[in-house]
Image: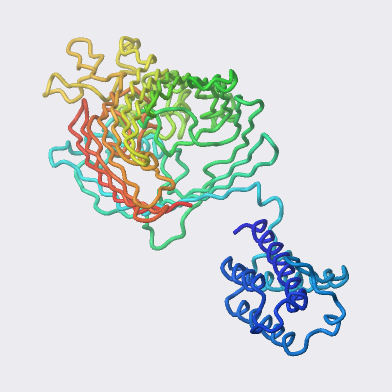
Amino acid sequence: MSQRLKFLRAEGLMLTTAVCATLLTAGPAFGQEAQGQAAQPDSAVATMVKLLVEEGIVSPEKGEALMRRAQAEAQQRAVTPPAQSAELAPPPAGAVRVPYVPETVRQQIKDELRQEVLAQAQTERWAAPDAAAPSWTRNVEIHGDFRFRSASALYSKDNALSAYVDVPAFNETGPYDISGFGGQALPTINTLRDKINNMQIRARIGIEAKVADRFTLGFQLATGDDPGPISTNAGLTGGFRKRDLWIQNAYAKGELFPGLTAMVGRFDNPFRATDLMFDPDLALDGVYGEANVSKLLGTEDFRFAVRGGAFPIEFEPANFPLTSAAKRNWRDRYLFSAQAELGKTFEGGVDVSLSAAFHNFTYMRGHVSAPCDVFSTVNIECSTDILRPLWASKGNTYFFLRDIDFTNADPANPREPQYLGLKYAYRILDVNGSVSVPISDRVQARLTGSYLYNFGFDPENNCLRGTLGQPLNNVEITDPTNSDQGVCDATNPAKFRGGNRAYGVYLSIGDPALFSVNPRRAKRGSWAINAAYKYIESDAVLDSFTDSDFHLGGTNAKGFVIGGAWAPFNNMTLGARWLSANEIVDAPLKIDVLHVDLGFAF
């Protein structure tokens, strides 16, 4: 019950009780009409007391006490009539005589009742002025969620053994000598060993504060095993060590004009997209703006909005190469995005939506370095080492960044320490459409389709520098006797099988609050069933930012997802998903993933 309602209740109690007291005071006049009859409390008083009890303003015990008091006064009047009654002329037929109550007496009764009600309110803590919340709390909203997950990864026994290089490890702990003369083993990913019931938690808490009529500040803290851009899961391992907490969101948002919105800082992905393009947990850094054209025009016949933003991925380092007095200039890496969305809700609640976006990742592709002498100087940095990809996963096409100068090499030990870079640019068209059909008040069916096309994909230039910079993966070997066969071999080249397209079909039935992999708050009894088919070629998107659960992250994968969720109580959900994916090209790599989730939200 709000404080306003409770104070209204208090005022009602005081006024009603004052009326009751006045009626009791007026008893003598009514008593004159009752002489010769059984001494009973006045019917108006009895009715008022009954109403007070029924409305819960006074307890039944207090109501009974009031009735006993009224009955006693009525009996006293019957035995000893007031002296002044003999001096009063009988009233005319049908008239009722009401005595005069002085203003001072009425004010005294009101003051006494007010003090009694306030004392009760303070005792029961429903109207305590000293405990009232500060005014700023009315502008603040706190929200949070917790998820406990059992995650299992199941690998096919037909998968290739150690055929996939662990790209993040290669670049972070490298460079690695690929010559084979030094006997250095390359890092590879697991392809055969199942991982069963890895327990994880995800905890997030956020706050939004309205600081002005049109401006809002938002902050969110989240768990996570590393500062990577995607997963906020924390594995329950490490000898009971404490868990890390990261700043997931920190932003300012303003509606500069009705229909015009802007955000700066770090915030949840504001674009309409599926997990083909961006992982559901991805947050973006930078500036964002949206124009709701329908709101600007004041029309409700359709929805039309345009969005755009600039999001820095990596700024130019001020001190590269670290080991050289001659520093190099590199351009900052950015994501520039623009999107238009059109939608309409028809009779019966059928909703149709269509969007198209263009995402341009600038300066992400690598380049072969200038000739680099790694033999004359220890730990030398080559000119393009800085172009190693950030948060790489697997699937994109990679090549060796360094052009090693062997002039000063030891013929007995011609080392070739290398890093990996992205072969192509990523300028991606993302088209999404959905149709939602209501089935009942809390059940809806939604069909969503998504198509991606990367315009930065240019395999026709794979061999511009001969074998330097040729693709290393997503390659089909045509000569089984030659494991070193390359795409750019002069006489017998291998075939490059990479691609630049992706598409997905998603079907969900149930409560829309449970359609997402990140359910927030759902009412008790809510349920949903979700299914999807996904096909992501090697270079359709960056493998750094796409769904991290399907095929355990990355691209060059196809398969299906099926799952469901149910809310046994308000804001509590139970869910499970089965994700089955296989590689499209390259060595066999089939991975099935099972998630069983328990979630809470407020």
Q: Quadrant of residue 95?
A: bottom right
The correct choice, above or below, for 532 with respect to 92 in the image is: above
Q: Residue furthest bottom?
A: 79
Its colouring scheme is rainbow
In the rendered image, residue 20, in percent from the top left (x then y), is placed at 71, 71
- 125 horizontally vs 529: left or right: right
In the rendered image, residue 226, in percent from the top left (x then y), is placed at 44, 46
Residue visible at 72% across and 84% down in the picture: 73
Q: How many marks?
A: 0
Do we see residue 185 in this rendering? no
Q: Quadrant of residue 88?
A: bottom right
Do we see residue 116 in this rendering? yes
Residue visible at 22% across and 38% down in the picture: 580
Q: Nearer the viewer, residue 48 or 173?
A: 48
Q: Nearer the viewer, residue 591 or 526?
A: 526
The correct choice, above or below, for 208 with respect to 364 in the image is: below
In the rendered image, residue 361, in percent from the top left (x then y), is placed at 46, 22
- 165 horizontally vs 249: left or right: left
In the rendered image, residue 489, in percent from the top left (x then y), is placed at 23, 14
Residue visible at 26% across and 36% down in the picture: 531
Quadrant for the N terminus in the image: bottom right
